[in-house]
Image: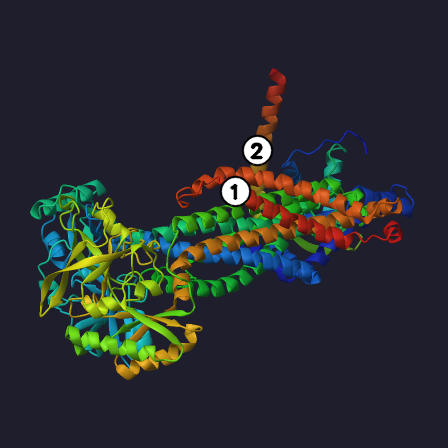
Amino acid sequence: MPAQLPYVLKALFTRLRSLFCKGRLEDDLSEELKFHLHREIEKNIAAGMSAEDARYAAVRSFGGVDQVKEQCRDVRRMRVIGELWQDLRYGIRMLAKSPGFSAAAVLMLAVGIGANTVIFSLLDSTLRYDISKSKGYDRLYIILLNNLKEGLFSVATYADYVDIRDHNQVFEDLGATSPASFLLTAGEQPERVLGTRASTNLFSMLGENPVLGRTFLPGDDDSVVILSHRFWRDRFGSDPNVVGKGVILDGKTLTVVGVLPGDNQFPPGDVCVPYSSLTKSSTERLVDVYPKINIIGKVKQGLPFDQVRSGVNNITKRLEQQFQLAPGALYAFMWHPPEGMSSTIRELSFMLQGAVGLVLLLACANVANLLVARAMARRREMATRLALGAGRFRLLRQLLTEGLLLSALGTICGLVLAVWASKSLAKILSELYPYSLMYLFGGVTWNGRVLAFTTLMSLLTGTLFSLVPALRASRTDLIHALKQNTSSATGFARFEGRSLMVMLQVALALTVLIASGLLLKGLSRAHGIFVGQASEKVLTMTLSPNRSAYLGIYQMRSFYDQILETVATVPGVVSVEATGGNRPYTAGNPQIVGFALEGAPRALLARPQARCAVVTPNYLRTLQIPLRSGRYFTTEDVRSGNPVVIINEGLIRIAKATHLDPIGRELSITYRFPQGGTTVEKTQSHAIVGVTADVKRIGATDPWQETVDGTPEIYVLYTQNPQPIYPPENSVRLVVKTTFSALSLVRNLREAVRTVDNSIAISEIQTMEQRNAAILAHISLFSGLMGLFGAVGMFLAAAGIYAVVAQFVTQRFRELGIRVALGAQRRDIISLVLFQGLKMILVGLIIGLLVAYNLTQLLASYIVGVDPRDPFTFLVVAALLALVGLLACYVPAFRETRVDPMVALRCE
Amino acid sequence: MTKANVDLLQGTLDLLILKTVALEPMHGWGISQRIQQVSEDVLRVQQGSLYPALHRLEQQGWIKSEWGESDNSRRAKYYSLTKKGIKQLEVETTNWERLAAAVAQILETT
């Protein structure tokens, strides 16, 4: 070897040589050592020993040749890589040798790691806004102006927005948005698309740059539109020349001016259109009118929150004085856009993450358990390798490599699983939250954080579950292990360790199960929801006519009469009802009216308001909204024309009229509606004929829509609606009762509607059953996921119990055989095994109960109305787990105890 | 084996090897014999430590090895000192002397 080569190069050369010319170096080494031995022998012979003795003495003085070799190899550090490769190959061979074990381990890890990846990805996307502080999102606040005195939410109008924008000290700029739906004319049938109305300064305030074209300019009116990236991709095939093209929304051709970037998450929806000049010119103040305005403010740089808060309070105080409202009547809710939209999901994601973390731990424990079992089978192998000169560390590394190999395989399968699961989850979420939250989770996003998390998790799990058996295996007592007959049962100390692991598993599974049980109970109680009859024989659908085509109130009415008549003739249809007000059975803005109840203490409320639904006579009856007193509408009401009205209990509460009998009293209703460019106010008096229960709603599925139980609600007959259109969007929701499953009629119903008007858009077709499922979906999704993790945890724990009990029986095969030979009944054997299993399970359950007892306090804020230490849930879940555990004991006990004493005795 | 021999202090084996091969290129057996002879059987080098030490020193570039013919015409691996090894020998010698002096001083004063 040339000596003048720099040392580094030389060292590298040796190391590479040690990797590639392994044989050559090995030969050198043995030759060197052989030479040494020869000289030693020669020396001994020279000293007068016989050849035999000389050789023996030389070998003895040398010590273990192989140990020396191994130590020399150690010195060549490149060996690490070589050995890694060797370990890896060996590991792969070992895994391939026991495919059942490998498949079970990989499957368990895949489930654990996959679930963790999905949930982490969900968590990550809910946290992403926090990271996008560079965009100034942390300075953004959504300001929701509420009239607390009248129980009204979001009362800001466009004029209020302009007022606040122009007279404030704390915001750099303020923008306004409203959720909106549009009729899109493209292709044969019109469609309904969701979008946003926005003030023209919104995008410059958000600092959002389009990928194509421009955002809004101050002079833009509602003749221009900005498209979401998705809409541009799906409808225009990502046409680079889309700017300047037309999109027909609500029968009007709007010019595309820009396309938003793909990761843009705000404003929600597919199209964004500036406010119309009609909205902008309205001078109404502090009323809940359509469109609902959400004010978004960007706080001046460096302003602390309390200053912002007091600045906003000054605004509300000023407005109270200006409009002679009681002090404190106005209150502005403020939250960061991401907070308000995703905080619930985020918190739930954290909890889910905790739960899947525990599940992964369970899976790890199981794999560790399997590995321990295998390590016991491999004790002779390990001992042999130790005896042949392998270092303990080297053995540890071999086992670690095998463990990491397993976890790597598990991770790969887990990732495949995660991609699939996240796609389904994303689909479910986008159906649940069509408006706002779908952006939160577009599936697993392969960013650095998710990958880092998965890799870390994979490494951690691999280390975790291989370390336990590895440490144990390397402690093996050589002589003992080498001599040991594999089937003898000396490993009882080892057995203790495994049952400890099973106890741990039972405890973990119990914790997850109790948490999910509490969540399920809490969620279902917190949202004790009345959503009408969950029937597959009641179909609802939204009809959105082209607004410009029907102007007059009589035109509208006869149009809908015609539709109702036509639909009623479809075979299979029992009855057809309709409502114009979209609450409570459709999404979107509710119609708000003013009211005054005869005989109610007037002074308490300056301008009480209620949600108004325009309905056909049998609407309430068909949906089975409970009647508290009085009666439903009848067709007689329609014929006679006497103005009647049905109210809910919430209205009576708000009007402080609970002491009055409302039936027969007069309710005067003040309608506001746009007509000919201005807003017209019209007051009309109705006689109250019935009181219904409050229709309870689920927490906001659309965060823009604050929903409060017990909000005043008014039902008005459609023939007595004084407004020119069906408020507020002129859409009508049909409720069709059918004799058999309504979904089979959808085609016929569509055709029937189209024979009346071919330009009508039909959307949101679903049965009440589907609708209820959709409303409850996000609750069921989260509790379902929780329950799923609990179930997986339980399954894993059961598998652990099964494995240990089975092993227990096999190991004590001989003992059991002796027992049988001495006359023990099979029943005795089974109960012996069961008793052993039960001990483990009980200890695990007690630990689990203690852990859960201390942990469930964390859930307290999520499970309103349920004691986080609810004894019922604790006991039921523990009993369930105990039962499953016992079953997991019984099966192997039953299967393995068919002991033929002769076989058992002979087998050793 | 006479119990007169002394367990080698950590690191002293390196010094002994470097010193031994500084005289002339030598094979492993020769090195162990030489150390034994010169120390008059006080120091005996275990083969289990000698060869790993040789390989380690070679790896560090202080000694180099060449295959050569031994006196009984067998192939043997001869180790010799490199330039870096000469420097290292000086460093280790100084260190050893300082250590020995320090130990001696403590033994004398107490």
Residue labelled with disc 1:
A872
Disc 1: host chain? A
* Pick the front one: A854 or A758: A758
- Residue A825: image x %, image y %? 83, 47
* Residue A185: x %, y % from top left: 25, 79
Q: Amino acid at mark 1?
A: Phe
User: Which residue sits at x=66%, y=42%?
Assistant: A840
Position of A171 with respect to A521 (left or right) is left
Mark 2 is surrounded, within 10 Å at the Cα level, by few (under 14), some (14 to 19) or many (20 or more) other residues, namely few
In three-dimensional space, the C-alpha distance between marks 1 and 2, rounded to whole angstroms, equals 75 Å
Q: Tag 1, which secondary structure?
A: helix
> Which mark is drawn over residue B95?
2
In the figure, is residue A735 to the left or right of A518? left
**Label 1 crowding class (10 Å Cα cut-off): few <14, some 14-19, many 20+?**
few
Q: Position of residue A513 (x, y in %)?
A: 53, 48
Residue located at (40% from left, 58% from top): A776
Badge number at residue A830: none
Residue toward you, A520 or B103: A520
Can residue B59 be seen here? no
The subunit carrying tag 2 is: B
Name the foreground residue: A660 vs A211. A660
Image height of B69 relative to A196, above or below: above
Given the current orientation, which residue lies at the most extreme right position?
A: A50
The part of the image, by quadrant, that contains residue A539 is: bottom left
Where, quadrant-wise, is the N terminus of chain A in this rendering?
A: bottom right
Q: Residue at x 64, y 36 (%)?
A: B12
